Amino acid sequence: MRLVKCWFCSSTIYPGHGIQFVRNDAKIFRFCRSKCHKNFKMKRNPRKVKWTKAYRAAHGKDMTQDKSFEFEKKRNRPERYDRNVTEDTLKAIKKIDKIRSSREAQHINKRLKPNKQKIFKSEVKEIDQNISLIKAPGSYQQDSEKMKVAVSTNKSVQNEAMEE
Protein backbone atom coordinates (compact mmCIF):
# COMPACT_ATOMS: atom_id res chain seq x y z
CA MET A 1 0.00 0.00 0.00
CA ARG A 2 1.56 3.24 -1.14
CA LEU A 3 0.86 6.36 0.92
CA VAL A 4 1.72 9.67 -0.71
CA LYS A 5 1.80 13.20 0.67
CA CYS A 6 -0.52 15.98 -0.45
CA TRP A 7 1.38 18.56 -2.48
CA PHE A 8 -0.36 21.48 -0.77
CA CYS A 9 -0.87 20.56 2.90
CA SER A 10 1.55 17.59 3.27
CA SER A 11 -1.03 15.26 4.81
CA THR A 12 -1.04 11.59 3.86
CA ILE A 13 -3.23 10.38 1.02
CA TYR A 14 -4.45 6.81 1.20
CA PRO A 15 -5.09 4.68 -1.90
CA GLY A 16 -8.34 5.55 -3.66
CA HIS A 17 -8.54 9.00 -2.08
CA GLY A 18 -7.68 12.47 -3.27
CA ILE A 19 -7.26 14.21 -6.59
CA GLN A 20 -4.38 13.96 -9.04
CA PHE A 21 -3.52 16.85 -11.34
CA VAL A 22 -1.04 16.43 -14.20
CA ARG A 23 0.44 19.59 -15.67
CA ASN A 24 1.45 19.98 -19.35
CA ASP A 25 5.08 19.30 -18.50
CA ALA A 26 4.04 15.91 -16.99
CA LYS A 27 4.56 17.07 -13.39
CA ILE A 28 2.12 15.24 -11.10
CA PHE A 29 0.45 17.04 -8.20
CA ARG A 30 -1.54 14.98 -5.69
CA PHE A 31 -4.08 16.58 -3.38
CA CYS A 32 -5.81 15.03 -0.38
CA ARG A 33 -9.10 16.94 -0.79
CA SER A 34 -10.76 19.55 -2.95
CA LYS A 35 -9.78 22.30 -0.50
CA CYS A 36 -6.10 21.76 -1.34
CA HIS A 37 -6.81 21.42 -5.06
CA LYS A 38 -8.79 24.69 -5.14
CA ASN A 39 -6.07 26.56 -3.22
CA PHE A 40 -3.50 25.25 -5.71
CA LYS A 41 -5.64 26.42 -8.64
CA MET A 42 -5.92 29.85 -6.99
CA LYS A 43 -2.07 29.88 -6.97
CA ARG A 44 -1.83 30.23 -3.21
CA ASN A 45 1.48 29.65 -1.54
CA PRO A 46 1.27 26.81 1.04
CA ARG A 47 3.84 28.61 3.22
CA LYS A 48 1.43 31.55 3.60
CA VAL A 49 -1.75 29.54 4.30
CA LYS A 50 -1.94 29.04 8.07
CA TRP A 51 -3.42 25.53 8.20
CA THR A 52 -0.70 23.84 6.12
CA LYS A 53 2.31 22.00 7.48
CA ALA A 54 4.58 24.18 5.35
CA TYR A 55 3.33 27.30 7.18
CA ARG A 56 3.77 25.65 10.57
CA ALA A 57 7.32 24.58 9.71
CA ALA A 58 8.28 27.97 8.26
CA HIS A 59 7.01 29.85 11.33
CA GLY A 60 8.51 27.54 13.98
CA LYS A 61 5.19 26.05 15.09
CA ASP A 62 6.19 22.42 14.48
CA MET A 63 9.42 20.51 14.80
CA THR A 64 11.11 20.31 11.43
CA GLN A 65 14.62 19.10 12.13
CA ASP A 66 14.82 16.03 14.30
CA LYS A 67 16.59 12.70 13.92
CA SER A 68 13.31 10.83 14.42
CA PHE A 69 12.02 12.13 11.07
CA GLU A 70 14.71 10.18 9.18
CA PHE A 71 12.77 6.96 9.80
CA GLU A 72 9.80 8.32 7.82
CA LYS A 73 11.83 8.97 4.68
CA LYS A 74 10.89 7.01 1.60
CA ARG A 75 13.47 4.46 0.51
CA ASN A 76 13.35 3.02 -3.00
CA ARG A 77 15.77 0.20 -2.25
CA PRO A 78 13.98 -3.16 -1.98
CA GLU A 79 14.77 -5.19 1.14
CA ARG A 80 14.66 -8.96 1.43
CA TYR A 81 12.00 -10.02 3.94
CA ASP A 82 13.32 -11.32 7.25
CA ARG A 83 10.96 -12.05 10.13
CA ASN A 84 13.50 -11.08 12.83
CA VAL A 85 14.35 -7.77 11.18
CA THR A 86 10.65 -6.98 10.75
CA GLU A 87 9.96 -7.76 14.42
CA ASP A 88 12.86 -5.55 15.57
CA THR A 89 11.68 -2.78 13.26
CA LEU A 90 8.16 -2.83 14.72
CA LYS A 91 9.58 -2.64 18.25
CA ALA A 92 11.80 0.26 17.22
CA ILE A 93 8.87 2.12 15.64
CA LYS A 94 7.02 2.10 18.99
CA LYS A 95 10.08 3.46 20.81
CA ILE A 96 10.60 6.14 18.15
CA ASP A 97 6.96 7.24 18.45
CA LYS A 98 7.38 7.71 22.22
CA ILE A 99 10.59 9.67 21.72
CA ARG A 100 9.01 11.84 19.03
CA SER A 101 5.92 12.62 21.12
CA SER A 102 8.04 13.63 24.13
CA ARG A 103 10.26 15.83 21.95
CA GLU A 104 7.19 17.48 20.40
CA ALA A 105 5.82 18.20 23.88
CA GLN A 106 9.15 19.77 24.89
CA HIS A 107 9.16 21.84 21.70
CA ILE A 108 5.63 23.13 22.37
CA ASN A 109 6.44 24.01 25.99
CA LYS A 110 9.62 25.82 24.93
CA ARG A 111 7.71 27.71 22.24
CA LEU A 112 4.91 28.79 24.62
CA LYS A 113 7.10 29.70 27.63
CA PRO A 114 7.85 33.35 26.66
CA ASN A 115 4.18 34.00 25.91
CA LYS A 116 3.14 32.75 29.37
CA GLN A 117 5.40 35.36 30.99
CA LYS A 118 3.90 38.12 28.83
CA ILE A 119 0.36 37.04 29.72
CA PHE A 120 1.22 36.97 33.44
CA LYS A 121 2.75 40.47 33.31
CA SER A 122 -0.25 41.86 31.42
CA GLU A 123 -2.67 40.28 33.91
CA VAL A 124 -0.76 41.73 36.89
CA LYS A 125 -0.75 45.15 35.21
CA GLU A 126 -4.50 44.94 34.56
CA ILE A 127 -5.16 43.99 38.20
CA ASP A 128 -3.05 46.92 39.41
CA GLN A 129 -4.94 49.32 37.16
CA ASN A 130 -8.40 48.04 38.12
CA ILE A 131 -7.85 47.25 41.81
CA SER A 132 -10.97 49.26 42.68
CA LEU A 133 -13.11 46.56 41.06
CA ILE A 134 -11.62 43.88 43.28
CA LYS A 135 -11.39 45.65 46.65
CA ALA A 136 -14.16 47.48 48.44
CA PRO A 137 -13.72 51.30 48.53
CA GLY A 138 -13.38 51.46 52.32
CA SER A 139 -10.76 48.73 52.52
CA TYR A 140 -7.94 50.93 51.21
CA GLN A 141 -7.69 52.69 54.58
CA GLN A 142 -8.33 49.55 56.63
CA ASP A 143 -5.59 47.38 55.08
CA SER A 144 -3.57 47.62 58.27
CA GLU A 145 -6.51 46.60 60.46
CA LYS A 146 -7.36 42.94 60.03
CA MET A 147 -10.69 41.53 61.04
CA LYS A 148 -10.74 38.37 63.12
CA VAL A 149 -13.61 35.95 62.88
CA ALA A 150 -14.39 33.63 65.77
CA VAL A 151 -14.73 30.03 64.72
CA SER A 152 -16.54 27.64 67.03
CA THR A 153 -14.66 24.50 67.98
CA ASN A 154 -17.63 22.72 69.53
CA LYS A 155 -18.60 19.49 67.78
CA SER A 156 -22.22 18.63 67.51
CA VAL A 157 -23.60 15.19 68.30
CA GLN A 158 -24.53 14.61 64.66
CA ASN A 159 -20.96 15.24 63.43
CA GLU A 160 -19.55 12.76 65.94
CA ALA A 161 -22.03 10.14 64.80
CA MET A 162 -21.08 10.71 61.15
CA GLU A 163 -17.36 10.46 61.84
CA GLU A 164 -17.72 7.06 63.46
Image (cartoon, rainbow, N blue to C red):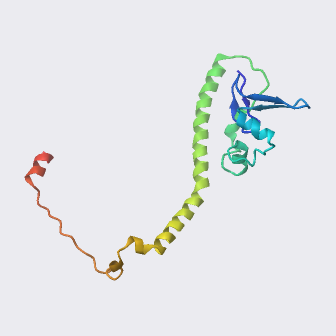
Tell me if residue 92 comes above or below residue 129 in the rendering: above
Foreground of the two, 114 or 97 = 114
Q: Quadrant of the N terminus?
A: top right
Foreground of the two, 41 or 73 = 41
Q: Residue at 73% across / 32% down in the picture?
A: 5
Tell me if residue 143 comes above or below residue 16 in the rendering: below
Please tell me in which quadrant of the rendered image residue 97 appears. Answer: top right
Q: Quadrant of the C terminus?
A: top left
Q: Taking 10 as reference, is 136 left or right?
A: left
Extreme residue in the left direction: 157
Tell me if residue 124 comes above or below residue 7 in the rendering: below
Provide residue 73's location: percent of width, then percent of height. Answer: 74, 33
Is residue 10 among the parts visible in the rendering? no
Please tell me in which quadrant of the rendered image residue 78 appears. Answer: top right
Q: Residue at 77% across / 31% down in the picture?
A: 30
Q: Taking 36 as reference, is 95 left or right?
A: left
Q: How many numbered callouts?
A: 0
Tell me if residue 6 comes above or below residue 62 in the rendering: above
Q: Residue at 50% across / 70% down in the picture?
A: 126
Provide residue 144's location: percent of width, then percent of height. Answer: 31, 81
